[in-house]
Image (cartoon, helix red, strand yellow):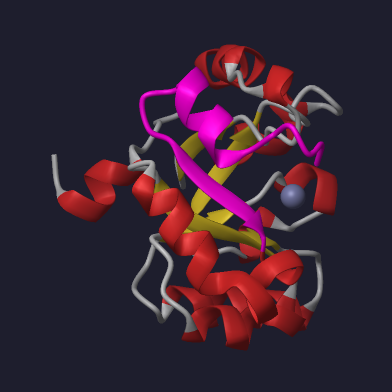
Amino acid sequence: MVPEQTPELVAHVSHAEIIGVSDHFEHFADKAYDEYVERIRALKMLVATEIDGAASVEYAASLHFDYYVYHCRDTAADYRGVERLLATGRPVIIAHPHVLETDLSRIPETCLVEINNRYVWQGDWSAYYGPHRDRFRFVINSDAHQPNWLTQSVARKVAADLGVQEQSITELLFGA
Ligand SMILES: [Zn+2]
């Protein structure tokens, strides 16, 4: 992530209807959780985190987040991590699964599946996501580690071509 990509800039650019920040859990959790939450909440954005596999799940599940974004590789431990995160009752987004070779047939349909603007074009998205389009609700994410990645245009085009159902996180959290 470039240092210029601050929560303040994300809030200012306001590239999407729903803005949540989900920094990599492993980068801040042990030292800056309170500061992280306060800074993002002060900007009226949702506070989430992106967890890299099973090793961090227990700790992340013990802290409060509005939702979780999860790297689920094709291992039994990572699939168990999904169950643990779902048990928090917060929405769980399976992050760019085609990049991590997640087997979507092993993911519970209560999870949301991410269509990620940064990565979705890297691979045969139609073959990967197409067979699961009716089983899941999807979210469209920018994955913006740099300010000029604050966009969803490629992911939105893919979602439209797939004809998937987009789920609003705020609707899930707070009702329509
Ligand atoms: Zn990621």
Judging depth in this view, the residue of 170 and 47 nearest the camera is 47
Residue shown at 28% from the left, 44% from the top = 170
User: Which residue is at a point 74% across and 36% down the rendered structure image?
Assistant: 145
Residue drawn 23% across the image and 43% down it: 171
Q: In this view, does 44 lie to the left or right of 94?
A: left
Which contiguous range is marked in magenta? 1-24
Q: In which quarter of the image is residue 168?
A: top left
Q: Position of residue 80 (x, y in %)?
A: 63, 82
Q: Position of residue 149 (x, y in %)?
A: 71, 22
| Along the viewing direction, whichever of 143 and 7 lies nearer the viewer | 7
Is residue 18 in the magenta section? yes
Question: Who's the residue at 83% across and 53% down the image?
Answer: 101
Q: Percent x, y for residue 10?
A: 54, 30
Is 154 colored magenta in this rendering?
A: no
Q: In which quadrant will I find the C terminus?
A: top left
Query: Is residue 173 in sight in this rendering?
Result: yes
Question: Does residue 96 sit above or below 125 in this rendering?
Answer: below
Q: Identify the image quadrant of residue 153.
A: top right
From this view, report whether residue 106 is shown above or below residue 150. below
Q: Which of 109 and 100 is in front in this view?
A: 100
